[in-house]
Amino acid sequence: MKNLKNIKHINLSNAWAKLDRIDYDFKFKNGEWKRLSRETYNRGNGTAILLYNKEKGTIILTKQFRMPTYENDKNDGMSIEVCAGAIDKGGTPLQTIIREVEEEVGYKITDAKQVLTAYTSPGALTEKMYLFVAEYNDGMKINDGGGLESEGEEIEILEIPFNTAILMIQNEEIIDAKTIMLLQYAKINTLVIPV
């Protein structure tokens, strides 16, 4: 880029993920160069999926504790979301989401359709989300789900009517960006007809 130079990375933390301060020179439209500094948090990329059942008019969501939402809102910290997970090194978004569906919600899917790619917080996070949809049915349930204890997960599985989920966005019970995007995608593309 012609308007970016002298980039310097300073690592601040390598705990759960990588936190860097990046100092750089940026040329503004008026021709002036300014030295800027931003922090970026890199935990890798992620995947998420909306599982839907056309016949029943339902979807599968998860509910789990999220420390950042607790810290920001000082509520119970519980977040209602689509099934999601971080992409393992060397894995693909599709491989990851198929594994996450089995671990988190207990369904065995063999394929999913990628419908969106999005940065959910590009001002601070490097994470790019690969968003999928897939149909499910009761016969695909192979275990109780709930996440992996070894990863500190305790996930409640919610099977709810699609129209209920849309109302949950409106009354702010669902405030997770990836979940809202996938529910809106399903509504716009009439993947699920409310029954």
Image (tube, rainbow, N blue to C red):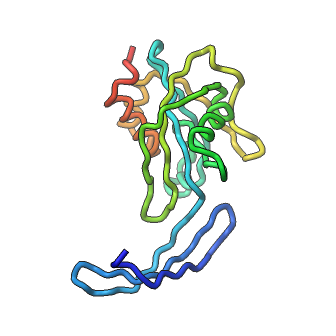
35 to 119, vertically: above or below: below
Q: Residue at x 52, y 82 (%)?
A: 8
Quarter residue 154 falls in: top right
- Point 55% across, 78% down: residue: 9
Residue sitting at x 49%, y 45%: 130
Q: Quadrant of residue 166?
A: top left
In the picture shown, does residue 182 fall above or below 134? below
Count up the numbered dots.
Answer: 0
Residue 4 rendering spot, x and y as whole percentages? 38, 79
Extreme residue toward the right, this view: 150
Q: Is residue 119 left or right of residue 27?
A: right
Quadrant of the image occupied by residue 33 = bottom left
Q: Nearer the viewer, residue 167 or 140?
A: 140
Picture quarter with the C terminus: top left
Q: Is residue 104 left or right of residue 4?
A: right
| Percent coordinates x, y for residue 88 in the rendering | 66, 49
Image location of residue 90, percent across then percent down: 66, 51
Decide: is 27 above or below 67. below
- Which residue lies most toward the left here? 30
Q: Residue at x 68, y 30 (%)?
A: 145
- Quarter of the image with the N terminus in it: bottom left
Which is more toward the observer, 149 or 189? 189
